[in-house]
Amino acid sequence: MAGNLLVSEEKSVPKSVKEMSKDGDEPPSHYIVNGNSFGSETSSAQIPIPIIDVSLLSSEEELEKLRSALSTTGCFQAIGHGMSGSYLDKIRQLSKQFFELPEEEKQKYARAVNESEGYGNDRVVSDKQVLDWSYRLTLRLFPETKRRLSLWPKIPTDFSQTLEEFSTKVKSMMEYLLRCMARSLNLEEGSFVDQFGEQPLMLARFNFYPRCSRPDLVLGVKPHTDRSGITVLLQDKEVEGLQVLIDDSWVNVPTIPDALVVNLGDQMQIMSNGIFKSIMHRVVTNTEKLRMSVAMFNEPEPVKEIGPVEGLIDESRPRLYRNVKNYGDINYKCYQEGKIALETVQITNNSDQK
Ligand SMILES: O=C(O)CCC(=O)C(=O)O
Ligand SMILES: [Fe+2]
């Protein structure tokens, strides 16, 4: 492609983030965001992230809080989700035990070149790509037939069983939330969840952010919106780092030990015809403390066509997005080409109605 630095083969990174973190290196240029400091952009504004009690969502009052949270900030802290604080600590511990393994043990689960599942760093697809200061272990959870069990850690020994149990709990929480979201907009309960199909996808990503000598120049994760339907995130118990973009300011998402952060991805923005927001977020690094998080993403089955729910389209709110299949793929291609995926499925004139 002329004028485009996109390359199909993945590139290798000279020195690992882990080594640079240990040696306290000044980050090399390909980790530096915009080539300048962004520290001053962080908002001091006290914009609160809404807290929603999932156990109260049968009440109109809590349901209205949910609708308002998702149509303004696009995210909230979920409490009352039925998972105890000690249970969430067990999941944090599982992640810690894995990342503390010797490098050669973790390499047994290494992400293969040009694949996204497994353990490793950013997939590097362009010379221009700014790299994230992080490591990840990415595993597909559902459909069960698509699990690549050879990439599931054998140590700690209870890893697979614990992840299986946690993912089942998060999956039912996501499905319940999708029903509540539909009710909050006076739609049939199944209006969103049914669009995910019989075999929705679900992915877990364990994130590890080493200490960084220059948090003013380098990000743990660059600004992005998730391609998911819903994302459920278990934050580090002590170390903050996640920031969401609200009214052009980066706002810290505080750590609440028993809460799970819920944010919507692009596919819920499409299905809700733009009423619910897929929020822009990023992760900042830290000189003192490393940080860990566990993110779970769900997505509609790739063969299923999704689109704005009919009941959310009228003259005052015309259809904003065309129907799409396999948005995950569209999103990944756009990422490689530096395009914003949601914009490519947006309807820009009235003749383009499907
Ligand atoms: O680590 C976090 O807090 C967020 C990670 C994230 O945004 C992602 O994995 O998509
Ligand atoms: Fe994200």
Image (cartoon, helix red, strand yellow):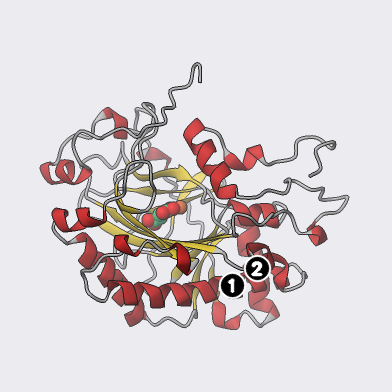
- What is the spatial separation of the Cα atoms under label 1 and label 2, in whole angstroms? 6 Å
Q: Quadrant of residue 257?
A: bottom left
Q: Residue 96: horizontal and vertical position, in percent?
A: 23, 65
The residue where tag 1 is placed is 175
Identify the residue shown where x is 68% and y is 71%: 64
Pick whichever, 309 or 222, lies toward us: 309
In the rendered structure, which disc, 1 or 2, sits on the residue that comes first in sequence? 1
**Residue 258 appears in view:** no
Residue 97 circle label: none
Marks counted in the figure total 2
Residue found farthest to the front: 145
Residue found farthest to the right: 315
Identify the residue shown where x is 21% and y is 67%: 97
Residue found farthest to the left: 23
The residue where tag 2 is placed is 193
* Above or below: residue 326 compared with residue 182: above
Pick whichever, 287 or 208, lies toward us: 208
Identify the residue shown where x is 31% and y is 64%: 152
Pick whichever, 123 or 135, lies toward us: 123
Q: Residue 306: horizontal and vertical position, in percent?
A: 69, 55
| Residue type marked 1 | Glu
Q: Which of the image's four quarters has the C terminus?
A: top right
Secondary structure, mark 2, is helix
| Residue type marked 2 | Val
Residue 147 in the figure: left or right of residue 1: left
Neighbor class of circle 2 (other Cα within 10 Å; few <14, some 14-19, many 20+) is many
